[in-house]
Amino acid sequence: MRVSLEINDRETEVEEGSTILEAAKSIGINIPTLCYHPLLSPFGACRLCSVEIERRGRKRIVTSCNYPVEEGLVVNTKSSDVIKIRKMIIELLLARCPNVKIMQDLAHEYGVGTPRFRLEDESCILCGLCTRICEERVGVSAINFIDRGVNRMIEGPLEEILDANLSDVCIGCGACAYICPTGTIKLEDIYRKIRSSFPLDIVEERTFGRVRTDDEIFGIYKNCYAVRSKREDILRIAQDGGAVTSLLAYALEDGMIDSAVITTANNWEPTTKVAKSYDDLKEGAGTKYTFYPGVVGISEAVDKGYESIGFVGLPCQMGGLRKILTSDQPYSGKRGIKLLVGLFCMNTFKQELMDFIEGKVTRLEEVRKLDIKGGKLKVYEKNDNVDQFPLSEIEDYVNKGCFACKDYTAELADISIGSIGSEPGWSTVFTRTDRGVALLEGAIDKGYVEAEEVKDLKELERLTKIKRKRAEREEEKWKSQG
Amino acid sequence: MNSVDRFSEGKSSSPKVNRQRIDSLSELEEFRKEILSKRDPNKPCITLCSGTACHAYASEKVALAIEEELKKEDLEIDFRRTGCHGFCERGPIVVIYPEEICYLQVKPEDIPEIISETIKEKKVIDRLLYTDASGEKVIYESEIPFYKNQMRLIFGPNRMIDPKSIEDYIAIGGYRALAKALEMTPEQVLEDVKRANLRGRGGGGFPAGRKWETTRNAPGDPKYVIVNCDEGDPGAYMDRSLMEGNPHSVFEGLVIGAYAIGSNEGFIYVRQEYPLAVENVNIAIKQAEEYGFLGKNILGSGFDFKIKVHRGAGAFVSGESSALMTAIEGRVGEPRPKYVHTSESGIWDKPSDLNNVETWANVPLIIDRGAEWYSSIGTEGSKGTKIFSLVGKVNNTGLVEVPMGTTLKDIIYKIGGGIPGEKRFKAVQTGGPSGGCIPEEYLDSPIDFDELTKLGSMMGSGGMIVMDEDTCMVDVARYFVDFLCDESCGKCVPCREGLKRMREVLNDIVAGKGKEGDIEFLEEIGEVMSEASLCALGTTAANPVLTTIRYFRDEYEAHIREKRCPALVCKELTSYYIDPSRCSACLRCLKNCPVEAIDGEKRKIHVIDQSKCTKCGTCFDVCPPKFSAVKKISGEPIPPPLPEEDRVIERFPEGKSDSASPNRQTERGDQK
């Protein structure tokens, strides 16, 4: 049912059950928020989105993020009362976090000068985005508020002592760091801690029934092939051999999985999608190099009732998921996840990389494909132009947290896939578990892919060793820093 | 029978009638007659108040002494340990029936005398009676002024029943209202409660009937009903005393409400800090189930209802309805937005009706005696009675139940006996930390929900803290803000950060660092907190500050402008000083000073070294009243000490010395 209301003297009609904030957005009216995120249920804690409503002649202040629209509602998003409230909230938070950029920006926008309170030097504004994404979307609740009143704080990844382990249930997905609006939670910290405390031996034992030997440089695997899709339409959009998309297509058709959580992109900003069909899967083709906590997509599949879910992700995501899947810890995706497809990864980049490309090359809409190979970033434009940059030029955009990672080939996945090791147009595939073997063999049988033996693993070995060395050096560095 | 053995088992002291499961109103009435027929109204019965307050006064030992004495004397006498009588100032309270002789502050050693004199000889022991201000003794409980001026509809039965005995409750008419209600339709019950205009006793005063109706009409199944016994206001304990002393009356109201709403499952949220309440509630639930007042097919009506007890883990904010429901769900007790009311979407998003203990306890009265009768008590907008927890600087502290509309003056003076020590009344704080301070000029206000709100305060759950002239209102505001800084959940910015900053400003003011504009600044912060906070705790958290500014602005100004605390409370603005004209060098203060800040010796006028003084006030307290040489001063310079040579006192004969003794030097001392 549609509901009509009036916002700042403009009539609009939205779906019943929408919030005032959503209604305002739909007609381009911006309301500032701090604790709101479209991925999460509204929290109503920052109160910055307060607006004035009028109902049956009575005015009152409500938070627009969680106030459901009503027929005939009259909303004013910038009455003098509203502005007064917002200014005070900004002043209060700026006094708490004078060095946090979003607070400085808001203060500037609303003309709030130096706070009249004593300045503190906190960075966390207690918006609760981290705790909610961890609970609602990641599904592990590894981070939460502790204490109450003026002593309220976040526990978990904010722990300052470096060698303190994260909460046992943390899977190091980085969602909290991704969503943190103040930069209080840093991906780097999360990754360092998850890596330095990762119980690799235990997880390997539980996954493969044994621990790797010293000479198993790519981790435990059963077979290694060069794989190429046999579907023309996939090959056209594929990064290399189109192996990931084709294997998933087979898994869906065969019933091995009923859905696949893949990473797609919206104008090169990564997001996840629950793919249920061949066409859905094609949206995920092509490598996105910037970081996104893809595991948040799993909860969507679970919520939609899928019971055998395939997940495509990076080595760090494979590690976190495998850890929680083989443990006794509660996790919402536990029963549903049936297949882990890992991608080779040296490191991820910050989203700012895309700003760099936009500045140096062209509008992101015009970019068709990104590829990193041979020490270069290649930018393929839709008009077939190709630009390239040495990696040294984009060093600043590297997620430094990735330096903590020793895993290049997604060693804890069921099946790992990447481009290094095979000829152009082919993908390198490690089958690691029985499920991984079954997937590849089935896909070959059904004509989704073709496979050849991999001839030369030297380059792959070199990169794997570089990544591991880099992590060891980092570890030394932290240890020496205490 | 001998009543002693019951304490170990929690069984009834009175003759037990072996009868279980009651299936109708007529069966209940029959059963009541049966109980009463076995009870001889003329047989002596000793009752002892055993609520938590009296427990703290060692009523347990008094009980043991009574049991022992009865055993020794082999007396056929009933002994009943009741819930709180309310006059906690003078507990433990022993009342001897049938005469109703009331003894206060009874100690174990008084028991043999009570048994031998009063029980056996029917003689009254004068020294244990209530003595009024004029020295007159009062024998009967109901004639003590503290009780005489109350209307104890809800709280009255406490003194008559043993909370661990369901038969005691049935004997006084208990569960009759439930039996009646179950013979009505749910709509009729709802209509009665609406007509009675019962308003919620937990804080906001929302009409209970309307709330019930919302839950009844809300889609969703199951529906829940909840008793809020998370009383957390400093100094308030009426819900505890009801829950401890008469749990069945709360259940009865709850089951009636559940029937009207169409709910088959209820929760009692009770603080873990109320162990006796938890104990008595659990015993009472078991008994009520056995007799068929809870469980399946209640009183043969076909209506099912069960109660679960949820023990709260000590958070003031959990008393807020949505926070309480979140806590019942097993999560941290934090409020959530209520744009959709909890009565429609509460526990696990199901329609949930929450009322506080006292509200539920009112329900049986309405059904039993009718909405007309009920609404004849009270004021236009607020019906029935209200229990207040009268504490602070008042002679008779305790629990007070009066009709809505009683004036503050009647409560504080007629019932409370006025202010101790001939001090002047200054303000009364109502409504707990979210309430406000009401000054003397409004003492004649008839109190009900609306009147208190008009005065900038609120009914809250009924806390009433009396303050005398020695109370600094800025300090009071700071106390409540400090309390809320710890007890706010900290979720929303205006409440968490606002309280923190209010405390910062108030701390400055009481420390003499206040500046012009601070008052307006506090008002500005408070206004935003009131408008923009997430829950009722936040929107009312500024009340203690805003009302003290409203009524005692001059005190704030004295602190800020003159660096003076008019009540001489704020340490940093107050100094202790020994008036040389009154000091007789008795050494008392000097010996008691914990930091050796006082200089002097025999026959040498004492002087406080201000640099060492920690302002603990010991010297002030120990200085003999006949000298009253130690003075508290604020906002004025401390007179310089006397020259060394003038400090020697020409000694008058010892013992005679009075204020006149150290004479000559003093004049000079006074001249500064």
Image: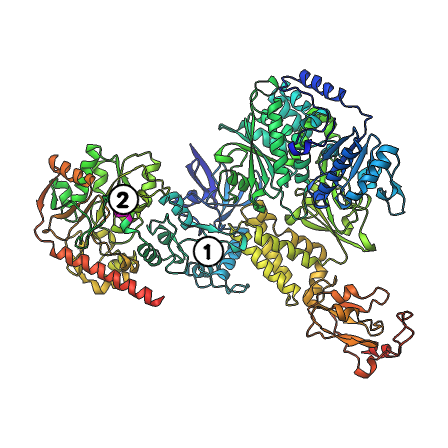
Residue at numbered disc 1 = A125
Q: What mark, if any, has residue A206 been given in the picture?
A: 2
Residue found 37% across the figure and 55% down from its top: A165
Quick check: A252 left or right of B519? Answer: left
Q: Is residue A203 magenta?
A: yes
- Chain identity of mark 1: A
Q: Decide whether the magenta segment is chiefly helix, strand or loop.
A: helix
**Magenta-colored span:** A202-206
Q: Residue furthest front?
A: B72
The amino acid on which the numbered mark 2 sits, given as a three-letter code, is: Arg
A438, B359: nearer the viewer: A438
State which quarter of the image contains the N terminus of chain B: top right
Quick check: A294 left or right of B400? Answer: left
The amino acid on which the numbered mark 1 sits, given as a three-letter code, is: Ile
Residue found 51% across the figure and 35% down from its top: B347
Q: Is residue A27 visible?
A: no
B252, B198: nearer the viewer: B252
- Chain identity of mark 2: A
Report crowding for label 1: few under 14, some 14 to 19, many 20 or more residues within 10 A (C-alpha): many
State which quarter of the image contains the C terminus of chain B: bottom right
Give the image location of residue A193, x and y in percent. Answer: 34, 56
B581, B275: nearer the viewer: B275
Report crowding for label 2: few under 14, some 14 to 19, many 20 or more residues within 10 A (C-alpha): some
Determine whether the residue tagged by mark 2 lies in a helix, strand or loop. Answer: helix
